[in-house]
Image: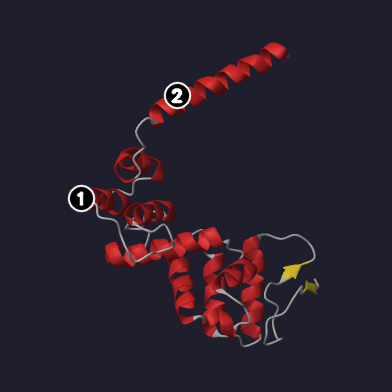
């Protein structure tokens, strides 16, 4: 099959993203890209991260660790990308929101539950990225990705949340039910407003049904 090379990085050797002219799965594209980069003698870290992207579904922690390393070292500049998010999107097929979730969750692990990084994911449970992301955002004073400043919260509540995420392996839906009232409380009168909106929406649906 022929390669379609839509654009090239600064070094002019390997395209930022390799695509077959015929449709193929993302994991296959990434596998082919890793092989092409390796054949061209590309940076070892670059090949390593592309392979991690291919294995992302199986191990988000490995992918997140690799992304944090690339971001901290600014290796993407050497590979011909203007910024970290362009690299993630064009080479790894990872959107900015996903990259932020991965890197923010990994930083939260290193700060609050470093022992989780030693788990194999088979004999010892690894929490989902969504659950760790919830934990990280619950503690943030600033909503930006892996912000250093954290809000002041009762330590007992923080410990309870930590256990729920890292020891119990609670899904994010359960975490929201248990901890949103503490970390994201609704303003006074919010429940009444929700009830009014639901009633209004129901009334509009009935009007449309009557018109039909």
Pointer 1: residues within 10 angstroms few (<14), some, or many (20+)?
A: few
The residue located at (61%, 20%) in the rendering is 204
In the image: residue 8, left or right of residue 120? right
Could you say where residue 67 lies in the image, as x and y percent from the top left? 48, 71
Task: Kindly report which numbered mark, 2 or 1, lies closer to the viewer in this rendering.
Answer: 2
- The residue carrying mark 2 is 195
Pointer 2: residues within 10 angstroms few (<14), some, or many (20+)?
A: few
The residue located at (67%, 15%) in the rendering is 209
- The residue carrying mark 1 is 154
Quadrant position of the C terminus in the picture = top right
The residue located at (40%, 41%) in the rendering is 173
Quarter of the image holding residue 13? bottom right
Q: Which mark is residue 67?
A: none
Vertical comparison of 16 with 120: above or below:
below
Looking at the picture, the colour scheme in use is: secondary structure
Between marks 2 and 1, how big is the CA–CA gap? 31 Å
Could you say where residue 91 lies in the image, as x and y percent from the top left? 62, 71
Q: Nearer the viewer, residue 13 or 81?
A: 81
Quadrant position of the N terminus in the picture = bottom right
Return the disc, 2 or 1, that comes first in the chain's sequence: 1
Quarter of the image holding residue 119? bottom left
The residue located at (44%, 28%) in the rendering is 193
* SS at mark 1 in the image: loop
- Farthest residue in the front direction? 188
């Amino acid at each position: 099959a022929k390669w379609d090379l839509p654009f090239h990085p600064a070094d002019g050797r390997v395209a930022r993203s390799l695509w077959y002219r015929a449709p193929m799965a993302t994991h296959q594209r990434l596998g082919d890209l890793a092989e092409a980069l390796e054949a061209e003698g590309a940076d070892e870290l670059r090949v390593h991260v592309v392979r991690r992207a291919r294995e992302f579904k199986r191990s988000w922690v490995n992918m997140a660790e690799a992304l944090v390393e690339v971001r901290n070292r600014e290796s993407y500049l050497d590979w011909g990308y203007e910024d970290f998010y362009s690299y993630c999107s064009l080479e790894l097929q990872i959107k900015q929101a996903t990259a932020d979730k991965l890197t923010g969750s990994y930083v939260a692990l290193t700060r609050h539950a470093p022992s989780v990084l030693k788990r194999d994911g088979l004999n010892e449970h690894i929490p989902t990225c969504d659950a760790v992301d919830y934990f990280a955002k619950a503690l943030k004073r600033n909503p930006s990705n892996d912000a250093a400043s954290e809000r002041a919260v009762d330590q007992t509540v923080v410990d309870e949340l930590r256990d729920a995420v890292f020891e119990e392996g609670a899904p994010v839906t359960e975490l929201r039910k248990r901890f949103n009232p503490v970390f994201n409380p609704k303003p006074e009168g919010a429940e009444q407003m929700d009830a009014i909106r639901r009633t209004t929406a129901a009334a509009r649906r009935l009007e449309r049904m009557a018109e039909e």
